[in-house]
Amino acid sequence: MKRVASVVLGALAATACGHPPLLAPTQARVAYVHATPDRLWDALLDVVAETGLEATASDRSSWFLRTSERVLKSGAADTMDCGDRGLSGLPGDILVQFTVLLRPAGDSTGVVVQAWGRRGYLGDQDTDTYPCVSRGKLEGTFFVRLAAAATRPEPGRRPER
């Protein structure tokens, strides 16, 4: 009983930190790239850096990476759904972060990208924020950049056929 209680308390503590949950493979769509997981991982690190993000949690052995948050400037209504209060009733910025999971699959690698967001006053004024759900456009854009980076020929190397 003590063990069950500690597991439940640990799960509650993890969710209370305000971080999105880890992705389960069945929760998001998997798209495939014709590249090895190692090549895709290197491309992932490049794309994260190119977009001004940082890896805040990563584990290459399980092919998992979570990025830092970034303020989403334009097109917020098209990319994130923050509910009734999120876009029209609440001023402030939308912060977005990405979770990426790679899944080796033979000569290709499955990629799961999930964007998470929250809206509200994000400065020193107020800490009240409201969760936002992605509409899928941010994930699509991120995936296209990642696939292009992973399949780009390396300098001095012929493209694979």
Image (spheres, rainbow, N blue to C red):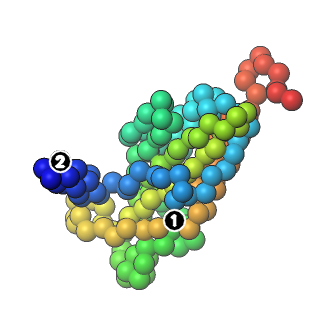
- Give the residue drawn at x 46%, y 52%: 23
Q: Which residue is mark 1?
A: 134
Q: Nearer the viewer, residue 89 or 144?
A: 144
Residue 148 place in picture, x, y as percent: 71, 40
Q: Is residue 40 left or right of residue 148?
A: left
Asked if the residues shown at circle 1 and circle 2 are in contact, with their CB atoms under 8 angstroms apart, the answer is no
Label 1: which secondary element: strand
Q: Residue furthest left?
A: 2
Residue 93: x and y in percent read: 39, 65
The amino acid type of the residue labelled 1 equals Ser
Does residue 2 show up? yes
Residue name at image x 47 percent, y 67 percent: 133
Q: Alpha-carbon neighbours of circle 2 within 10 Å: few (<14), some, or many (≥20)? A: few
The span from disc 1 to disc 2 (Cα, nearest Å) is 36 Å
Position of residue 74 relative to residue 21, above or below, is below
Q: Secondary structure at mark 2?
A: helix
* Amino acid type, callout 2: Arg
Mark 2 sits on what residue?
Answer: 3
Vertical relation: 146 (above or below) 119 = above
Q: Is residue 69 above or below residue 127?
A: above
94 left or right of 4 in image: right
Residue under the point 69% across and 45% down: 32
**Which-is-in-front pick, marks 1 and 2?**
2
